[in-house]
Image: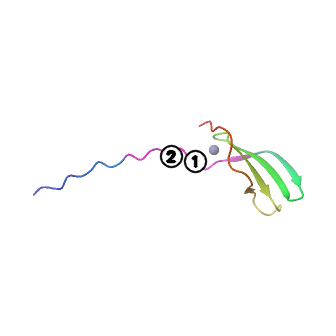
Amino acid sequence: MTFPPTLPLPRIAPLRAHEHAWLVESRHRTSDGTVLYVRCASCAVRRVDLQAHPHVPPAAASAVFGDAHV
Ligand SMILES: [Zn+2]
């Protein structure tokens, strides 16, 4: 009995993306809430977050920008 030829398993590229670990660099109170300027501790990209209420977690108010240093 012969077995059908099998294809090699594709190599899965290592994930370059990671869950950013945001550190707050500065914060400023505005009429819309607190604007947080955050930087990833791992790859140093930046983002601007808005925390509309002190009891609500901040949400991204901008895209991620800057050069990642992995
Ligand atoms: Zn990161």
Outermost residue, top side: 69
Q: Which residues are magenta?
A: 11-23
Residue flagged by tag 2: what amino acid is it?
A: Leu
The majority secondary structure of the magenta stretch comes to: loop
Residue flagged by tag 1: what amino acid is it?
A: His
At 88% from the left and 55% from the top, the residue drawn is 30
Foreground pick, 22 / 11:
11
Whether the residues at callouts 2 and 1 have beta carbons within 8 Å, the answer is: yes
Task: Give coordinates of residue 27: x percent, y percent.
Answer: 83, 48
Q: Quadrant of the C terminus?
A: top right
List the residue tagged with mark 2.
Answer: 15
Badge 1: residue crowd in 10 Å (few <14, some 14–19, many ≥20): few
Label ID, residue 6:
none
Badge 2 element: loop
Question: Ligand 1 closer than 8 Å to the CB at disc 1?
Answer: yes
List the residue tagged with mark 1.
Answer: 18
Locate ligand 1 by image quadrant: top right
Task: Give coordinates of residue 55: x percent, y percent.
Answer: 80, 63
Badge 2: residue crowd in 10 Å (few <14, some 14–19, many ≥20): few
Give the distance between the C-alpha atoms of the residues marked 2 and 1, in whole angstroms.
7 Å
Residue 52 relative to residue 18: left or right: right
Q: Quadrant of the N terminus?
A: bottom left
Q: Is residue 22 magenta?
A: yes
User: Residue 67, relative to residue 38: is it above or below?
Assistant: above
Badge 1 element: loop
Task: Give coordinates of residue 67: x percent, y percent.
Answer: 65, 37
